Amino acid sequence: MTQPVLSVRDLVVEIPTRHGILRPVDGVSYDIAAGEILGVVGESGAGKSMTGNAVIGLLDRPARIVSGQVLLKGEPIHHLKGAALRKLRGRRMGMIFQDPLTSLNPLLTVGDQLTETILEHLDLSVKQARERAIAALDEVGIPAARQRIDSYPHEFSGGMRQRVVIALALCAEPELIIADEPTTALDVSVQAQIIALLRRLCRERGVAVMLVTHDMGVIAEAADRVAVMYAGRLAELGPVRDVVTQARHPYTAGLMASTPVASQGQKRLRQIPGAMPRLDAVPAGCAFNPRCERAQSRCAQAPGPTLQTCDDRAACWFPITHEQEAAI
Amino acid sequence: MSALIQVENLIRDFDVSKPWLNRVIERVPKAKLRAVADVSFEIQERSVYALVGESGSGKSTIGRIIAGLVGASEGRVVIDGVDIAEQGSADAVRSELQMIFQDPYASLNPRWKVRDIIAEPVAVRGGQIKGLAERLLQQVGLSASDAGKFPHEFSGGQRQRICIARALASNPKIIICDEPTSALDVSVQSQVLNLMTDLREEMGLTYLFISHDLTVVRHMADRIGVLYLGSLVEEAPRDRLFDAPKHPYTRMLFDAAPRMDAFGREVEPPKGEIPDAINPPPGCPYHPRCPLATQVCKEQHPAPRMIGETRVRCHHAE
């Protein structure tokens, strides 16, 4: 097997506070191969954005990586700081944030921002950098890129701005892109365009993409594999079709059942009782056990289930087998 | 069945002109943004009517006009036989109508206790509020002892329940829900949607449900209106609309919506974006993006016409 672009091994992120240490990311491991889109889903507070930020070294203090490894093509990068990290960011890892208006500088033209990034990372003349910026805008589907390169961000619509952000993330040809809720602020028709664009770039350039979102529909359409997070831990990790249609972890199954599906009628939605635990009150054992209808006494005892100790897909002592699901 | 809310030829313009000095120096005329363009529909008593559309389609403006928060430029809104634009008469229907907003963090006063927040719509009218908040909290699935807490002590889903309790306090007939679950996680969204369904049955409520999320709308609504750039382009009963969408815009929306069963779907994504509402295209507002567009679409704004149970504004729909 070829080496994955990104490997995350037992990543633990902690935030020390006056009331004790919080663990927003608790022992997360996964790989992303070249040309693959890994979807990371979960509800707010599940630690999905925190994982993305930890990978790219954007954790705000006092949050810090206390153990585990982040490997980019086999090289550990989790301990890098300052200039070494800045060289990596943009060059080998790109980031796309949720709100395209806040991730662009309103005082600089789009062209200035793109050429700045290109000149920082690639050994090109200003003129070549500008040509490259135009090519990047062209590639993400901005019409008349040559004319629009000197426009300011406010002159673009929301969807076009997000394309500019994608161009910015791609212009130095990174190996890995972390897209944190890239379509959440956009309308459905524009969302469909952006997803199609991400998938095309991923396929053509062989970029590995970590797509963080709360929208199961987006994951189902865009991702190859999906990681479901709950309270800082991986609940389930597997190929997207299997996870969506035959969820093994009760939390994933609940998440799927509570998503209104267009093809079903006005049936009552299934609901998961309660809410995600606060980080200072994560239950012992499996974090999902107080809300789980399958929970038994073992679930409330430490150590909790992980992907390594249970079956290879769901971190659950009593995963749903497909035969049982067919009976329901 | 009688129509509880009638909206007739509703138009709302917003003045988006530059300040007058700039207009004089730069010689630019006044600019108008037509947020709602000639919209008519009726909402039957005890039904759920949904307005869907993308941002800038005017769905929230219509909700706000019906709630009386924004005035209409032309046309009328009749609620329970009372024209809400008439002086004095509006107060009579105002207490029958309440709103639930999108962001439960912004719509609750952080300095008020939950008890006072919920009882306010009744208290301002001098009604009896003893025990009201406690009873309503239980009805929406919280506990009576929560009445003494402040909003920051609750999660997003619980806050939205408090908003629902407040909306129910004055015993309204109509609740206008403007994106009530857009800010919530899916597992919490399902709790809130189920609660809204239960309350509708228990209390005989009528909902105007405003949303951009087609799956949620399909789950909740009896009748659906699709808005594009201020125009009601298609209106039909739920199953009719989803089984046989007539307007090309509705079809595009359905195709573009992400689906749980569409793994690695390879479809041509829709072209273009919503045009600038200040300078809308002439004729049918959808024609620059429409695959069916012909010359007549560029010249004439289509009038509404009926195809079966569907009312559609398109020259070519059949």
Image (cartoon, coloured by chain):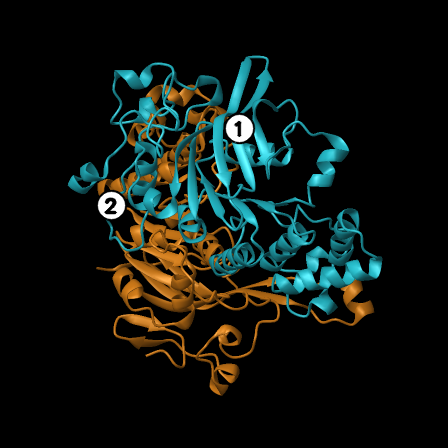
Res. B30 image quadrant: bottom right
Q: Residue at x 27, y 23 (%)?
A: A295
- For disc 1, the neighbor class at 10 Å (few under 14, some 14 to 19, many from 20) is some
Foreground disc of the pair 1, 2:
1
Q: Kindly identify which chain the residue marked by label 2 belongs to.
A: B
Q: Kindly identify which chain the residue marked by label 1 belongs to.
A: B
In percent of width and height, residue A40 lies at 47, 40
Q: Residue at x 34, y 72 (%)?
A: B246
Q: Is residue A28 left or right of residue A102?
A: left
Disc 2 marks which amino acid?
Gly
Chain in orange on the image: B
Q: Is residue B142 left or right of residue B276?
A: left
What residue is pinned by disc 1?
B110
Q: Please, what secondary structure does the residue beneath circle 1 have? A: loop
Q: Residue at x 69, y 63 (%)?
A: A135
What residue is pinned by disc 2?
B204
Q: Is residue B237 visible?
A: yes
Q: Give chain A's shade.
A: cyan
In percent of width and height, residue A299 lies at 31, 19
Depth check: A22 or B306 in front? A22
Q: Is residue A229 left or right of residue A96?
A: left
